[in-house]
Image: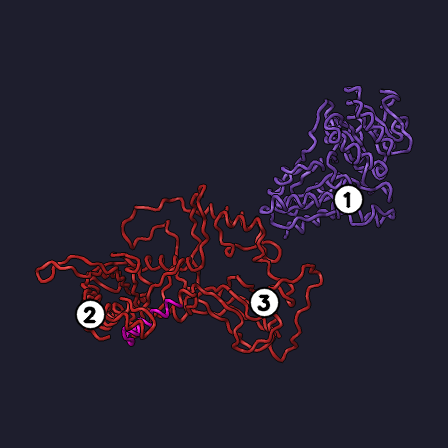
Amino acid sequence: MPVITYIDAVTQALREEMRRDRRVFVLGEDVGVRGGVFRATNGLIDEFGEDRVLDTPLTESAIVGVSIGSAAYGMRPVAEIQFADFIMPAVNQIISEAARLRYRSNNDWHCPLVIRAPYGGGVHGALYHSQSVESIFMSVPGLKIVVPSTPYDVKGLLKSAIRDEDPVLFFEHKRCYRLIKGEVPEEDYTIPIGKAEVKREGTDVTVISYGLTLHFALKAAEQLEKEGISVHVLDLRTLRPLDKEAILEATAKTGKVLIVHEDNKTGGVGGEVSALITEEAFFELDAPVRRLCGPDVPAMPYSPPLEKEYMLSPEKVAAAIRELAEF
Amino acid sequence: MATDVTMPQLGESVTEGTITRWLKKPGDRVAKYEPLCEVATDKVNAEVPSTISGTLLEIVAEEGATVEVGQLICRIEEEGGAASPQPVDQGRESSPSASASAGQETPSMKRRYSPAVLRLAQEHGIDLERIEGTGKGGRITRKDVLQYIEGRKAASPASPRGDESPAAAEKKPAVPEIQLPAAGTSAKREGISVSLEEGDQEVPVSSVRRTIAQRMVTSKHEAPHAWTMVEADVTGLVQLRERLKNDFKEREGISLTYLPFFIKAVVDSLKEFPYLNSVWAGDRIILKKRINISIAVATDDALYVPVIHDADEKSIGGLAKAIHRLAEKTRSGKLTLEDMQGGTFTVNNTGSFGSILSQPIINYPQAAILSVESIVKRPVIKDSMIAIRDMVHLCLSLDHRILDGLMAGRFLQRVKERVEAYGPDTQI
């Protein structure tokens, strides 16, 4: 099975879906001729032409707004927001329009829209190229939020997102693009949205994470195994809807839960997961549910030592797991 | 300079005590001999007096904690030394609760049970006091409980309880080993595996119930029980009591039951048969001089056996008052250790719940126990005629190491005679 990078898995999924379904098209800033600033849409315009790979003006509200309109007409747009930080002008379209189109029209219209965006820091991106934005959309009914961590998950979930009949926000941690490699089958396959996956079995502490920090958790788990601590790692993969069953099962496995994400702690997805756990798995808990997250500081400093301080790491994750294991 | 205060030995056979209430809190001044806390041992409440004067520094064993004799319960800063309370730990964010008041730096986490731990303990009927905690601050973790459960399963006896060897003296290997509490060791945890079915209710074993269980097993295990019975015609006694009871109630304010009459008969008979008032001590029999009658008092949840000391010095009225006082104390939970200790012979009023025949278990380490059954009107032959008489059975269980049938039988005869001697004109 070929081993490809995270970003290549994105391209592969897009290409295969565009081949499979003529209604699928891609739009965004620099996605066409340039092939995307991260090369996510590399080669697509050559294969599918400029009618299906649109270079848009610098206007996120229009990128999403136009996508919504086309989706209502039966197209399947895959919009790219060049950096998740830029999604703000499109928030109105996403929350007030795309998310509620089906509900508002009583099923007459729906919005099979995918919005892809690279998020996250650790790339010297400073304040406008490092943010995590998933928490903004976490509370919006009608939206799905997918954050895969491995190339295999990327391809399967992006295909599912494109085939989904309702709006899906697809966030890719930009640091994973070339850093994370994995085996990805060449055939067509999908991964259901809303299903988490146990990436590592363990018995002492459960770590729930997604995106880049999931890899930190896996690294930390490897290190801690040598110290005799067995770590159970659950990759959420989808943030909305949360895989409640998987979360509760993983909680019951060890009784000790650590939620890890790069996004700011306050108001982050970790709070929602934690509330779910204490609400429904109270008698499984052997320790308070802990969260290891980005500090409550704008994401994120440009100064390298400050960025390092902000970012999580396998060591920071390991320390938190260790503390919980010893509790 | 801080002095350690440990759990004192509150009674001869007491190995541990549960702290029910702290009377002092950290920062309080304590005078020598002033009570520090209330402790429940087995079935009795006692107070722990301070060994020195000073200021209470920190409470180590919290309310509800069961502490072994000799274990640390608190620290006192002795008078004369710089008595500054310990600074509150800076890193602690949570507000101090009533028990973990300022002055405590690292409270023991031994009894900080998590929801998972409590659930598992309840589901498997585990006494968490018995588990060692490997978590932070000695906390019992979920893993600790799970491991304990595994260990228990492995230790449960596979051999069926049953009907193999007949001899009572033969010790079966499946029987759990019970060691005397006086020896300082507590009974080993019984590895009993019982299946739990739907609808079954699990009732946790209280320390009182546990003590009762322990004592009963010890008694049956140590003393080979033999049993004998006589029946007595107490028509006269019934008439006597009928005659006296109203005046007695008016004068003394308490009811006159049959029990004091029986106890008097027993006590007088014990004077004649000192071996019935004795204790087996391995290589010798100790004949006790004082006659202290243990009486069984039942409450809703447990059986208590307080003692009427020097019962031979009391009149029937005095015995009645003593019985009443002890019963009241039992029901209100105010029995002291002294009330429970020193019994030399037990009289059990099983008749009070309608029984006409019992096989009482000897109140270890006494030599015998007498049960007074229900007084029943029955047709009997008296002077070659059929008469309706008030009859009562007197049942005696005896330790066959100390007593034989002949002596026990003679003792019982004397009790019967005395009891039958009561008549409507007897002076009490």
- Alpha carbon distance from label 3 to label 2: 59 Å
Q: Residues within 10 Å of mark 3 (few under 14, many from 20)?
A: many
- Residue B319 drawn in magenta: yes
Residue B398 visible within the image: no
- Residue A186 drawn in magenta: no
* Chain for numbered disc 3: B
Q: Where are the magenta residues, as a range? A: B309-328
Residue that mark 1 sits on? A263
Left or right, A306 with respect to A320, comes to right
Chain identifier matching the purple colour in the rendered picture: A
Tell which residue pokes out farthest to the left in this image.
B384
Residue B123 visible within the image: yes
- Alpha carbon distance from label 2 to label 1: 92 Å
Q: Position of residue A261 (x, y in %)?
A: 74, 43
Up the image or down, A227 lies above or below A140; here it is: below
Residue that mark 3 sits on? B59
| Label 3 or label 2, whichever comes before in sequence order | 3
